[in-house]
Amino acid sequence: MSSFCKQALVAVLSILAVSAFASVDEASLDASVLGQCYLKFMLFQQVAAQADTVAAAAPQADQDQIKKAAADWSAAKTRSVRTMLTARFPDDARAKFEQFVADYTTAEKAGDPQFLARISEAFGFSPAPADYASLRKSAIDSFLQPDMAEGSKWLGEIQTWVDVRGKTPGTPDLAVWLTRDQPAAAPAKPAKKKPVKKPDSLEAAEAGLGEFTAGEEEVSNPLDSFDEMRKNRSERKLEEAQAGMEQVASEREAAEQEYAAKKTAAAQAEAEAMKRHADKLAATEKDALEQRKNSWVNRLKSIVGATVSAATGAFTGGIGTRAGQEAANAIFESN
């Protein structure tokens, strides 16, 4: 083989090697994104489910508030998972996620060591976890940690609100309690009055001088002059009437906007007062809130790190294809 052929062969092999490594890296990144999204989804579902256990000890009216808050929280987190998936897989995010969940659930149920090794490598876990429960625990200590902290704090807030609500009359609603740290909305400003130009009656009443033309003096008809004056008066009255109606409409619109702005400002002031009240009540429960947050961290770690039947059975309804379909439906068919 000539020197040139050897160099060409080395170049081709180098290109193929780089291409193979790139393909492996892309596949590993795909698996990492899919795996992270699935485990995040599992955690978010468990957080929402635990909110139901907190609600069970509350009065019915408070249970309804907790269920609504849980639905809103879960929907927001589901959207974040969907955004993560579509950013990585713009064209076929649903199909890839559904297939991954089917493969993961089947492999976990069967204790497949090869799938476990691949997903562990994609997550960058070294050494690889011994089993799927250990894989989830490693995820909790790494990329799931921020989500775990947020979910635990949220559950602690709800549990604290239920406790305060039960012993303190006048405790604000849960929506106010959960948003007490959010900045207030800017107060609405009343719209400026639109100026309406009134016609100048004196100017309109004046007869135009017209253009001077030398020549024979024309004899004017008194009836024509009278008709012209009456026509001018009618037009002037119509203009004044229209201007008056526009003025009344403008003033009425301005008054309505001013009233609405005052009502909005009053509502905002009341909302801010309720937030301040909630903040004072929460301040007295600071230590209890922190203890509850830590308690929920440990509880969620135990739940998410448990066996596959306990971790997924509540919301996937099975394994394999069915699990993939139901998880994909939850992610891509929610609001």
Image (tube, grey):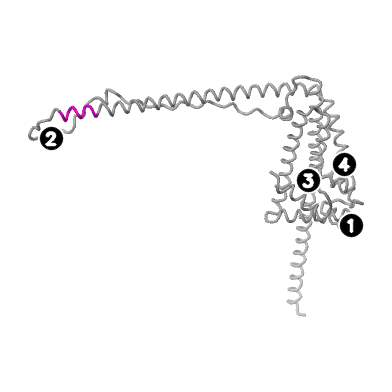
Disc number for residue 41: 3
Location of mark 4 (residue): 303
* x and y, in percent, of residue 327 in the image: 77, 49
N-term-proximal mark, 2 vs 4: 2
Residue 159 in which image quadrant: top right
Work out whether residue 176 or residue 6 is closer to the camera in this orientation and state it: 176
- In the image, what residue type sits under mark 4? Ile
- Which quadrant, please, contains the C terminus? top right
**Circle 4 sits in a helix, a strand or a loop, which is it?**
helix
Q: Which residue is drawn at 76% across and 71% down?
A: 10
By secondary structure, the bulk of the magenta-drawn segment is best described as helix
Q: What residue appears at the point 28 percent right and 29 percent down from the top-left corner? A: 235
- Residue tagged 1: 112
**Front: mark 3 or 2:** 3
Classify 194 as above or below 114: above
Q: How many labels does the image show?
A: 4
Mark 4 and mark 3: Cα distance apart in space: 14 Å
Depth check: give the residue in front, 224 or 129. 224
The residue tagged 2 is: 213
The stretch of residues the image draws in magenta is: 223-231
For label 3, the crowd category at 10 Å Cα-Cα, with few meaning under 14, some 14 to 19 and many 20 or more, is many
- Dot 4 and dot 3 residues touching (CB under 8 Å): no
